[in-house]
Amino acid sequence: MVKYPIKRKPHEKITNYANLGMTLESDIEQTNQYYLDHNIAVIHKKPTPIQVVNVSYPARNKAKIVEAYYKTPSTTDFNGIYKGKYIDFDAKETNSKTSMPLKNVHPHQIEHLRNVESQGGIAFLIVHFKQYNEYFLLPFDILSTFWDSQHEKTGRKSIPYLTFKKSAYIIPFGFQPRLDYLSIIKQHFLDK
Amino acid sequence: MVKYPIKRKPHEKITNYANLGMTLESDIEQTNQYYLDHNIAVIHKKPTPIQVVNVSYPARNKAKIVEAYYKTPSTTDFNGIYKGKYIDFDAKETNSKTSMPLKNVHPHQIEHLRNVESQGGIAFLIVHFKQYNEYFLLPFDILSTFWDSQHEKTGRKSIPYLTFKKSAYIIPFGFQPRLDYLSIIKQHFLDK
């Protein structure tokens, strides 16, 4: 990649965040590439939504965005098609040993996944428990049950790890593909 | 929206391109919002892919991207689900009165739409002939026929307007929804 020099004001902290927190995401993207290369499925990550405010055209070079801000995504990160079925999911990581906090999921993502299900799509989360290095496919119906009850008296603000062990599906981590989540979909969600 | 002041170097031309060339796109986005609000379909535009090079954190404010570049999209702009079917398309505009140049379509978009069709999805273009203010839904099979033959002796580098009139489907332009392309899908692509 070409490096672009930039003048920094001394009081500004400038960091390249391109490779931080990207492990789960890149494992999924490599898996999707494998699916694509083997004509198994067409699933892509959506680009991160960015609000562009100012673009500069320095001396015949290509457009350079000089001011922009990250926007909150209005949907999930991943979608596509597998065996004629619409697939839609997001990826979450947690450091907790006991549960996945519901605050990791945005309300608009719940709404989006709910809409997807009502149209006949397959909606879920891929959740990485980093302390155990375990990956789960959490079907949307389990997520929505916990989500809807979180403000009730007996509700909780997280989904217990034990619920994942009992009711979600563990995704095998391998070499090719890295995270074969479609094997879970094939086994448990199709032809039912 | 909050305005962010920016120091400009006098030799840099800085332009806000946020609203240029967005008419067809915003007509489709308004249509998709109508579909979503009426539980007809869940179809979204993907964000424009941007390569972020440098991010600054000026004094407790939110992250400010200070250097970034537009990337070539690897897929189409729009996808989603309608009546259980995966939908995937791109939107194109042309000023020509006689044809849509094939150079308006990127090779990777053709490849992507082909992959979508092979997985059982519904793939097409929405094409706006600006001189006539006519909108067409062009099924992928017609597009791919012209695409594949463009390098043959008898091949041409564009799809004639007359082919659109004969073989594509005109999309009615209205108030709500603006461009009811799913009515075409319902009539011609489902339950066949």
Image (cartoon, coloured by chain):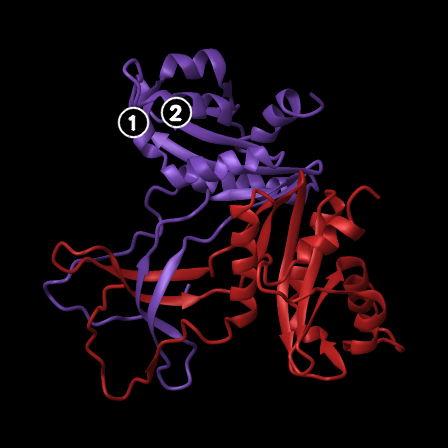
Chain colours: A purple, B red
- Kind of residue at badge 2: Asp
**Direction right: furthest residue:** B154
The quarter holding residue B159 reads bottom right
Residue under the point 89% across and 77% down: B154
Residue under the point 83% across and 64% down: B145
- Where residue A63 appears, x then y in whole percent? 41, 76
10 Å crowding of disc 2: few (<14), some (14-19), many (20+):
few
Q: Nearer the viewer, residue A94 or A69?
A: A69
Residue B153 higher or lower than A103, as above or below: below
Which SS class for mark 2? helix
Report the mark closest to the observer, 2 or 1: 2
- On whether disc 2 and disc 1 are found on a single subunit, the reply is yes
Q: Chain of mark 2?
A: A
Is residue B82 rendered to the left or right of residue A134? right
The quarter holding residue A88 reads top right
The Cα–Cα distance between marks 2 and 1, rounded to whole angstroms, is 24 Å
Which SS class for mark 1? loop
- Kind of residue at badge 1: Asn
Number of the label disc, if any, that sits on residue A148: 2
Q: Nearer the viewer, residue A131 or B175?
A: B175
- Where residue B86 appears, x then y in whole percent? 66, 44
The residue under label 1 is A95
- Where residue A39 appears, x then y in whole percent? 70, 42
Residue under the point 56% across and 57% down: B31
Mark with earlier residue (2, 1): 1
Residue B123 higher or lower than A153, as above or below: below
Is residue A69 rendered to the left or right of residue B7? right
Residue B181 higher or lower than A182, as above or below: below
Q: Which quadrant is home to the N terminus of chain A?
A: bottom left
